[in-house]
């Protein structure tokens, strides 16, 4: 951790009870709502939105215009690309059948959970409730409608697994016998439930 105080651009909009870790930077026109907790050394890009009570771990990057709606929970070292959207309503409606405007008591928020080290590419949409496993990689423009296993590479609409990635984000190559290898680091991975784990 950096040990330096958080930096907030004057044009950013932060509620009074937001918690920012040391070294975190909040850039132009970003909005961080009541009760949000942002860990140390995070970067919240221009125009990004962090909803009420959202939790971000340390060393996260939330790029420009990403929308992280409550009750999202994001682990350490997560990358959320430009214009990514995390939804929070399974059955969205603006009004009730009688025409009255829906209020906060008329719906139950569901969230996106992102485990440590995962990356969500630009303009991807994660449809809550859904979990993105550790070190997974969601391709740009993907629409995630179901859980993503650890180390999975998913792409498309709806997103489907198209490969595996290591901790560097590089696609893994098969070494046979259900062992996968990172071509950059030589790290080896083996099956663990629906996903992979470092061995």
Image: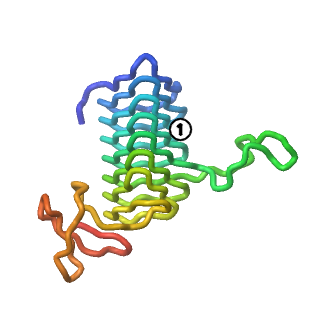
- Crowd rating for badge 1 (residues with CA inside 10 Å; few <14, some 14–19, many 20+): some
Report the colour scheme. Answer: rainbow
The image quadrant of residue 7 is top left
Residue 61 lies, in percent from the top left, at 34, 40
Q: Residue furthest top?
A: 10
Residue appearing at x 43%, y 51% in the figure: 141
In this image, 76 relative to 88: left or right?
left
Q: What x and y, as percent, mark residue 79? A: 34, 45
Give the structural element (helix, strand or loop) at label 1.
Answer: loop
Q: Looking at the rendering, which quadrant does residue 156 occupy?
A: bottom left
Report how many numbered discs are placed on residues in the image: 1
Quarter in which the N terminus is drawn: top left
- Residue 187 x/y as whole percent: 15, 64
Of the 4 image quadrants, the one containing the C terminus is bottom left
Rendered position, 69 above or below 16: below
Residue situated in front as seen by the camera: 46 or 33: 46
User: Looking at the image, which is closer to me, 100 or 19?
Assistant: 100
Residue pictured at 34% horizontal, 70% vertical: 195
Q: Would residue 127 appear left or right of 44 to someone viewing this image?
A: right
Instruction: Name the residue rendered at 33%, 36% in the picture.
Output: 42
The residue most toward the bottom is 177
Query: Residue 153: where, in percent of width, then height?
Result: 34, 62
Residue at x 46%, y 22% (from the top left corner): 12
Relative to residue 181, is residue 53 depicted above or below?
A: above
User: What residue did someone put label 1 on?
Assistant: 51
């Amino acid at each position: 951790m950096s040990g330096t105080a958080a930096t907030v651009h004057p044009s950013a909009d932060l509620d009074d009870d937001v918690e920012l870790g040391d070294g975190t930077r909040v850039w132009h026109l970003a909005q961080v709502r009541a009760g949000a907790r942002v860990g140390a050394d995070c970067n919240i890009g221009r125009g990004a939105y962090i909803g009420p009570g959202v939790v971000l771990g340390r060393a996260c990057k939330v790029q420009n215009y990403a929308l992280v709606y409550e009750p999202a929970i994001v682990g350490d070292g997560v990358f959320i690309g430009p214009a990514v959207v995390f939804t929070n309503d399974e059955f969205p409606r603006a009004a009730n059948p009688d025409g009255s405007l829906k209020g906060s008591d008329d719906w139950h928020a569901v969230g996106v959970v992102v485990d440590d080290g995962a990356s969500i590419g630009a303009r991807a949409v994660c449809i809550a409730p859904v979990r993105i496993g550790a070190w997974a990689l969601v391709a740009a423009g993907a629409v995630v409608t179901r859980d993503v296993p650890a180390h999975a590479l998913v792409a498309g609409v709806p997103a489907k697994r198209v490969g595996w990635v290591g901790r560097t984000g590089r696609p893994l190559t098969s070494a046979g016998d259900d062992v996968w290898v990172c071509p950059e680091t030589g790290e080896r991975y083996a099956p663990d439930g629906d996903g992979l784990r470092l061995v």
